[in-house]
Image (cartoon, grey):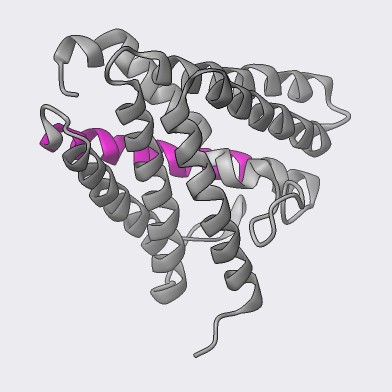
Amino acid sequence: MPLAPNLRLRILSSLVLAPLVLLAVYCGGWIYALIVIVSAALGLSEWHRLTAPNLKLILLGLPYLGGFAVALIYLRALPAIGMGLVYFLLATVWGTDTGAYVAGKLIGGPKLAPVVSPNKTWAGLGGGLALGMVFGYGAALALGARHPYAAIVIAFFLAGIAQFGDFFKSYFKRRAGVKDSGRLIPGHGGVLDRIDGLVFAALTLALFEASAGMRSGWW
């Protein structure tokens, strides 16, 4: 069966963007920080379009996307473990997105929250959690985490948080009456459409590492 045009665009865009993101994480330093800040700025512009003219909601974008940028930069800057942690985070979130999309399309079934996001299903939620854990564990194992099995538990929570982030942004898209947050990325929509799950997952992992993760020595 031939791929739908939109799915082809999604795959092609991912094949272009994913290696660039992975390379930026590998390089670290100002290159990585610049890409994170530009992504947050583009996302903030899209957030403004989704929430205007409500001033309080517009201002909510500052901690929402500013915190995202700070969290990603903080994680990458952690000595010795920063690069691995960001790769683990990306693998988990990308696995979650892929699992949710594939399970939702192939299995379908009851809607998870039709008022907020009519295309999301319980099957997609389960698929996202499952593949997020698999990808997270695989990344931890490949990158030499001290306790890769702990990554399964952490990835499970991050996968759940990532899907909450998707619903969070979907609510505001629904409120604004738009399908995508923007048109910058072919097949995906806007920047927010690609980083919505990553925003909350990055904040969660950064807070975990700052409070207990580094002391636990799991990575």
- Label total for image: 0
Name the image quarter holding the C terminus. Answer: top left
Most common secondary structure along the magenta stretch: helix
In this orientation, does residue 167 appear?
no
- Residue 127 screen position, x and y as percent: 34, 59
Q: Residue at x 68, y 28 (%)?
A: 38
Taking the view exactly as shown, the residue that stands out farthest to the bottom is 1
Side of 101 where 215 appears, left or right: left
Q: Is residue 181 magenta?
A: no
Query: Is 9 drawn above or below residue 106 in the view shown?
Result: above
Which residue is at a point 52% across and 58% down the rendered structure image?
Answer: 15
Q: Residue furthest right?
A: 53
Query: Which percent across, then down, holds residue 175?
Result: 75, 44
152 inside magenta stretch = yes
| Residue 192 placement: quadrant | top right
Q: Position of residue 205 (x, y in %)?
A: 36, 24
Left or right: where 135 falls relative to 66? left
User: Could you tell me residue 18's position as x and y percent?
Assistant: 50, 49
**From which residue to which does the magenta span run?**
149-171
Instruction: Relative to 79, say whether 136 is above or below.
Output: below
Residue visible at 57% across and 18% down in the picture: 30
Image point (41%, 40%), residue name: 90
Q: Quick one: 83 or 126, which is closer to the camera?
A: 83
